[in-house]
Amino acid sequence: MIKVLIVDDEALVRIGIKTIIPWEELGLELIGEAENGKKALEMAREHVPDIILTDIKMPIMTGIELLKALKREDHPAKFIILSAHDDLEFVKEAMKNGAEDYILKLELESEQLISLLKELKTLILTSSSEQVYVSTARPAYHAPLHKEKLFKDMLLGVVKTQSEILHHLEANRLTFPEEQLVCLIIEVDDASIYLKYGESPHLLDYSVLNILEEVLSSYAYGHVISLQLKQFIAVLSLRPKGDARSSEGLEELMANLRITLRKYLSTSVSIGISEIYDGYERLQQAYREAKEAVRFAFIYPRGTNIYYRDICSLSSQKTDDLSAEMKSLEKAFIDGEMDDIQQALERLTEGISRNHKLTKELLMGISFTIFYLFQSFVENYQLSEKGILTKDMYDRISTMSMKVDFIEWINQLKDRMTRQLMENYESLRVYLTKQFINKHYKGELSLEKVADYLQLSPAYLSNLFKKETGQNFIDYVTEVKIGRAKFLLKTTDMKIAEIAREVGYGDEYYFSKVFKKNVGESPLKYR
């Protein structure tokens, strides 16, 4: 099997990569992970991995230092660089030193990484060791780069000077006019369409790419590449082909593109459109603009053209801040108050509906937070997760493409919870009883008082509590009081009498008697 080593100083990144890749299914063996280059160097010497996924900036030894050290030793490992947006100069250096490719952490998706790992696996298995060393040792910017990699490097600023770009375009016979350049990011709206392709979702991307190339070439010079699953980048020069110069011509191009995709693949696309620039060196800026524009596709109807200039205006609008609603929701979940949870969720969905500044990434983060809040709630209530927190509900977070999808998802989760609570009425009553006791143990607490709060008869509540917990009501109350007293005895300098009053005992001597009966020693001795 092909051996892989993960190197990153962020534990969450290492965990994320380990989780999203089906290693055995791909014929890969994850031999380990390291939090810095020095440890990775030791592991690479011992285990000889075929592929190393490494961060650039790490303590003790950086990813570039690791790469150089292993290349000096003629180590056969192929490197994939994990970088942040502000690491591009380091990425350029890594590529010069023989790294195979790089991935931006913020854009890391399983499909993209799986595709890259498959490519490297094929290269390793079909090449002799000598050929592998030769291919990885070529200096960057002298040999021609493949089309996709070249445009990726241009757009991300790894290859960014006019002379570098022109050199590679000419070497690959990919030159096109550098006047009136525009960048389009084309994104398939419905991610679920890929499910029809089972384990071969890239077949759909291949079909989409062919249609894009055919339609776009009839309007303008330029090129289109696949960025990642369901997302494509087109770099076009509008100058040479008459009608496409104007915004009307560009609109016609995109309309024709949609008609063709709908006709042959029954799918729609949203398109982020940059400003128009002159000069290859402006492509990086154009790419950033198109990318920012398409991030807002989810707030529009499917099949919309989103211009960067419109997003700039939209982003400057005064919008509601959802942080207060999220804090209110978290508090409601912690308190376990169903009415408060329902109201907080309603306010949150209303805020999402009104707020046009929200990005898809932010809404995904909110949705994951809500999911985990529900998960904790279910555990506290001791409810079954089967009817609420299904794998489908979790997986949908990553595939939702429109703002209305997120709102619908939140409402569906809320409805499932309501139904589950109704089906677990008795467990809910006991949970609320415990909650009431935990909140009011300092005062006078009786079975009658709690029963009145829950609108139940004392006898029914007593029997229900015993049945569900195996404990008498009064025993649980005592357990809560003594538990709090033990904590105060160990962590504060409060007097025994003060602690007694704090946990609801007016008489210090009675408190000491109850404490000794339950703990086996007096409060003073326990302290």
Image (spheres, rainbow, N blue to C red):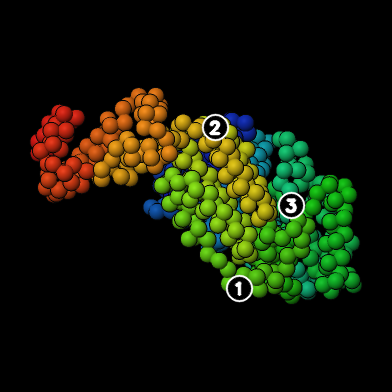
Q: Give the quarter of the figure containing the N terminus.
A: top right
Instruction: Kindly report which numbered mark, 2 or 3, lies closer to the viewer in this rendering.
Output: 2
Percent of width and height locating residue 246: 84, 74
Task: Give residue 143's position: percent from left, percent from top.
Answer: 68, 56
Side of 179 relative to 117 (left or right) = right
Q: Neighbour class for label 1 at 10 Å: few (<14), some, many (≥20)?
A: few
Q: Which mark is residue 189?
A: 3
Kindly report the distance in space between the C-alpha atoms of the residues bearing marks 2 and 3.
37 Å
Compared with residue 416, is residue 159 higher up or lower down, i.e. above or below? Answer: below
Residue 94 visible in the shown view = no
Closer to the chain start, of discs 1 and 3, is 3
Q: Which residue is mark 2?
A: 423
Q: Which image quarter: residue 288?
A: bottom right
Task: Locate the C terminus and report the quarter of the image it occupies.
Answer: top left
* Mark 3 surroundings within 10 Å by alpha-carbon count, few (fewer than 14), some (14 through 19), many (20 or more): many
| Label 1 sits on residue | 316
Instruction: Say whether residue 504 is visible.
Output: yes
Residue 252 placement: quadrant: bottom right
Estimate the x, y position of residue 13 in percent, counting from the top left.
49, 47
